[in-house]
Image (tube, rainbow, N blue to C red):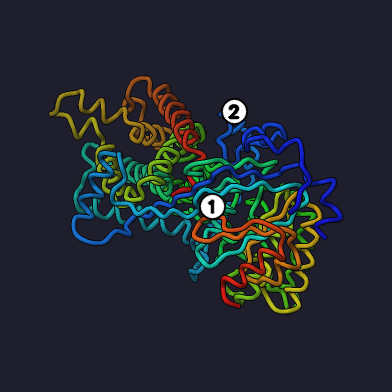
Amino acid sequence: MADDKSADRAHIPTVIADELHIVYRVNGAKTGKGSATSALSRIIKRGEERGVRKVHAVRGVSFTAYRGEAIGLIGSNGSGKSTLLRAIAGLLPAEKGKVYTDGQPSLLGVNAALMNDLTGERNVILGGLAMGMSREQIRERYQDIVDFSGINEKGDFITLPMRTYSSGMAARLRFSIAAAKDHDVLMIDEALATGDRKFQKRSEARIRELRKEAGSVFLVSHNNKSIRDTCDRVLWLERGELRMDGPTDEVIKEYEKFTGK
Amino acid sequence: MTAPPSPDDGLSPAELAAKYGLSVSGARPGLFEYVSQLWGRRHFILAFSQAKLTAQYSQAKLGQLWQVATPLLNALVYFLIFGLILKADRGMSREVYIPFLVTGVFVFTFTQSSVMAGVRAISGNLGLVRALHFPRASLPVSFSLQQLQQLLFSMIVLFVVAVGFGSYPKLSWLLILPVLALQFLFNTGLALVMARLGSKTPDLAQLMPFVMRTWMYASGVMFSIPVMLKEHPAWIGDILQWNPAAIYMDLMRFALIDGYGSENLPPHVWAVAAGWAVLVAVGGFVYFWKAEERYGRG
């Protein structure tokens, strides 16, 4: 699938990562004596941050993604996949290096904007607005979102607070809201496996649709099968470093050897 | 991928990006661009503030009734302590003092809770900041908007108290609107400043209650500054009276209460009120914007 289209699209880059480093700072992770006073002196001096633990999550990753590519990100837990996605989206500032993008990449997901104490109905509106949709766009798609989620299949649940939903129902609604918007550069973080079997099928179909509309797609997943199905290129991250970058089959084969499958 | 040799091979990433017009991801927009982005998100800002307001009491049996009951109980407690036990109403009749006290409490609470919400606006919503794109100023602005709506509920209680103590609706009540607008501007600016400080130093959430309480006692919430400080040098009273919290409280009392005339207001009070609002709002906005690209770091 990579070869037939690569000729006309290979040369228009959409995302360029140039020696990208991401560092998290964690307050209060330091143990032992004197941590309180050192924290105080840190606040007062505002200089070198001694009491703060630094987590170097991404270390010097460089790659170029081209228009029309679907790129999978693999690696063991904590290898920096999600962090890399957030940096590409411009949500986490780079410590060193730069990311250049064409348009505004967006993560698929609105979980953080939704409130459990509000009804599903209001969450659809709130989530849509948080993703930058206009009120008219939300009104147009409202019914689609609700139908897609299947929340109302077992009665009028959309007018109940989200905290009354089962975890599966809530996950379905969240996915439906997130997938309602079209994206330039789309990034999906293990969103494929939500809900029951029927809903999984439906969401996979929707992701394929979104992929067609998007310029480039990044997919983070631990499921090698879904990577094989959707991606034509794979980046393998390990301990924040880019270990391999190439066609899906080659990289997955090496990765499976590495994980001992 | 076995890409055929292309004319781009020799280019550095930066040159390649420039050639195809890619921009740096997550870069801070210019100030005017930022303002227009923020304006574009006005529906989100409003919806988010209303959602927060509703979610606050959604588990309570009395539900949204608490929006009014909370300020009412608050006013009752202050009346009990300062009106009945401490008798802080020096030189004021009961008809003036009770609305005076309640107005002070509500108006100050508006600023206080905006500041407290501001401190946690970024640090308490890091998940949201790290998941979605929007001008980060949306959060502090949205939180002060939530406090404004909260105050509007309190105003219902305030009107009832005013009427109950003999101050009937009159034309000067219209002055409440500009006072609220100015105070809202001031609070939003303050919330923006606190949001940036709090994103770097979340400890401020522990410290601020003490700062705010000191500010409250210094602003004449439960007593009249000129009367209380009669024996002290005049400049102390002047400084206290010109502090923004006292200014907005006094203007609100002047608008609302019959027996509280302009002789209680410091000179140039409207100019000072507007000056504080514009200064803090513009300054706070620029200060917040300066760190826009760094809020995701936490």
Between A96 and A87, the one lying in front of the other is A96
Q: Is residue B154 above or below residue B226?
A: below
Between B36 and B186, the one lying in front of the other is B36
Name the residue type under label 2. Answer: Phe
Subunit that carries the residue with mark 2? B
Q: Is residue B148 above or below residue B10?
A: below
**SS state under label 1:** loop
Q: Residues within 10 Å of mark 1 (few under 14, many from 20)?
A: many
Quadrant for the N terminus of chain B in the image: bottom right
Say which residue label 2 marks: B32
Q: Is residue A97 above or below residue B241?
A: below
Question: Taking the image as drawn, is residue B46 in sight?
Answer: no
**SS state under label 2:** helix
* Both marks 2 and 1 on one chain: yes
Q: Residue at x 66, y 42 (%)?
A: A101
Question: Taking the image as drawn, is residue A260 in sight?
Answer: yes
Q: Earlier in the sequence, mark 2 or mark 1?
A: 2
Residue A246 appears at what percent x and percent y?
A: 68, 57
State the CA–CA distance, disc 2 to disc 1. 24 Å
Residue A95 appears at what percent x and percent y?
A: 47, 43
Say which residue label 1 marks: B130
Residue A133 appears at what percent x and percent y?
A: 70, 49
Q: Residues within 10 Å of mark 2 (few under 14, many from 20)?
A: few
Residue A198 appears at what percent x and percent y?
A: 76, 78
Name the residue type under label 1. Answer: Arg
Q: Residue at x 65, y 65 (%)?
A: A174
